[in-house]
Image (cartoon, rainbow, N blue to C red):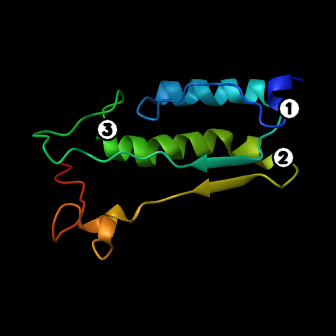
Amino acid sequence: ANAAVDGAGGGIPLVCDLEDFASVRNFAENLKEEAPKLDVLCLNAGIAPSSKATKPKLTKDGFEACIGTNHLGHFLLANILSQHLENSGGLGRLVVTASSVHDPETPGGSVRGKGGATLGDLS
């Protein structure tokens, strides 16, 4: 067993770039090797497209960056690690957070005026 995993407050630094599916897959495989069980997986990363951008930024896999990072990257990570969570004696938890930026009725949602934050034209 790895003392960094077993010790209270310990950890192992691993890279997970949610904009890059290869990085997500590599992270998940490394985590499964390093940690015998996974108690909690928190999906908390989020990016917002620049309001000054003239064209959308794309992920390494060709998706619009906000969708690729905030949704597809998290979805892939959760799917790869779902069995690892289930193997934690039924106690593993998946925690997904969200932002009020996409709700125009909240203060965070008014960041871009009356329409709130949008993903723009995804065509």
Residue in view at x 68 percent, y 23 percent: 30
Badge 2 amino acid? Ser
Q: Are marks 3 and 2 in contact (CB under 8 Å)?
A: no
Q: Disc 3 versus disc 1: distance between alpha carbons?
A: 39 Å
Q: Nearer the viewer, mark 1 or mark 2?
A: 1
Q: Nearer the viewer, mark 3 or mark 2?
A: 2
Q: Which mark is residue 25?
A: none
Examine the rendered structure and indicate whether residue 4 appears above or below residue 56: above
Examine the rendered structure and indicate whether residue 25 appears above or below residue 108: above
Q: Is 14 situated left or right of 69 in this image?
A: right
Residue in view at x 33 percent, y 32 percent: 59
Query: Of residues 7 and 85, which is closer to you in this image?
Result: 7
Measuring from the top left, give residue 78's x and y in whole percent. 60, 45
How would you rate the neighbour count of disc 2 (Cα within 10 Å): few for under 14, some for 14-19, many for 20 or more? some
Q: Which mark is residue 63?
A: 3
Residue that badge 2 annotates: 88
How would you rate the neighbour count of disc 3 (Cα within 10 Å): few for under 14, some for 14-19, many for 20 or more? some
Examine the rendered structure and indicate whether residue 119 appears above or below residue 69: below
Badge 1 amino acid? Gly
Badge 3 amino acid? Phe
**Residue furthest left in the image:** 54
Residue that badge 1 annotates: 7
**Residue furthest front in the image:** 9
Measuring from the top left, give residue 105's x and y in whole percent. 30, 77
Q: Secondary structure at mark 1?
A: loop
Q: Disc 3 versus disc 2: distance between alpha carbons?
A: 33 Å
Measuring from the top left, give residue 71's x and y in whole percent. 44, 49
How would you rate the neighbour count of disc 1 (Cα within 10 Å): few for under 14, some for 14-19, many for 20 or more? few
Q: Secondary structure at mark 3?
A: loop
Of the image marks 3 and 1, the number of the one nearer the N terminus: 1
